Amino acid sequence: MKPLFLGGQPAIDFLNTALTPDGEAVETIPDGRAFLEWFVAAELISEAEAAKLSRRFGAKALDTAAAEARKVREWAREWLARWRVRPGADYGDEIAALNKLLAREASTHELVATKGGLKLEERPQLESPNALISLVAMQLAQLLAAEDPSLIRECAGTGCTLTFIDRTKAHRRMFCSAAACGNRAKVAAFRSRQRR
């Protein structure tokens, strides 16, 4: 199964790389190749960069990075669950651990020409497979610093374990996807009414 990008923010989409639809566990980043594919799909690195990293680091090193990423994902999932309930609590240990992950990244700045003019871009320097974790850590840090924890929701769909940020105007979004879980809920409600 390919990763789903329904969360509204890359850190949430990263958490959604492990899901349990209808009670069956699904891992979408089982190895280093899939981990790089996730970065490309999340638009955090380009396909060319992923191919270069794959050649440079090799499958074994990337598999090790993917294994660490899965551990970071579960640690972040547990922390975010607590943060959503108690946003003002003291998370000194968690922040220190996240800062260690962020310290793995080095970056450079580059001026690039766009259709609208010039733009200054920050480019990560991925000197080791472990530096990939810093890209995930950056997204997690941005989530914690910029998002309202009360807007991070779990899908109300039966059997769905996905999380998303509710950016609707009225903040009443219930499903990860209106086309999938939302539609299934409507069909189930319709059938229930028909039986009555």
Image (cartoon, helix red, strand yellow):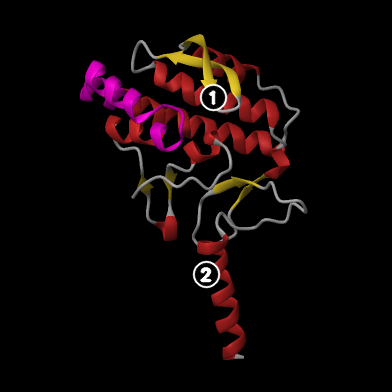
Query: Magenta segment, principal secondary structure?
Result: helix
> Could you tell me which secondary element the residue under label 1 belongs to?
strand
Location of residue 26 with respect to 121 vertically, above or below:
below
Is 131 on the left-hand or right-hand side of 119?
left
Q: Position of residue 143 (x, y in %)?
A: 62, 30
Q: Where does the image place residue 122, in percent across and percent down from the top left? A: 53, 15
Between marks 1 and 2 in the image, the one whose residue lies nearer the viewer:
1
Task: Identify whether 165 is placed above or below 86.
Answer: below
Residue range highlighted in magenta = 39-64
Residue 94: % across, % down: 59, 21
x and y, in percent, of residue 129 in the image: 34, 18
Which of the labelled discs sits on residue 95, or is there none?
A: none
Q: Quadrant of residue 144?
A: top right
- Identify residue for label 1: 114
Quick one: label 1 or label 2, which is nearer the N terminus? 1
> Which sits in the foreground, 71 or 1?
1
Label 1, label 2: how many angstroms apart (C-alpha)?
A: 42 Å
Per the image, label 2 sits on a secondary structure element best described as helix
One can see residue 190 in this view = yes
Disc 1 crowd, CA 10 A, few/some/many (<14, 14-19, 20+):
few
In the rendered image, residue 44 lying in the magenta stretch gets the answer yes
Q: Is residue 179 magenta?
A: no
- Seen at 65% across and 17% down, the residue is 92
Q: Dot 2: few (<14), some (14–19), or many (≥20) neighbours within 10 Å?
A: some
Mark seen at residue 184 = 2
Q: Amino acid at mark 1?
A: Thr
Mark yes or no: residue 77 visible.
Answer: no
Number of marks? 2
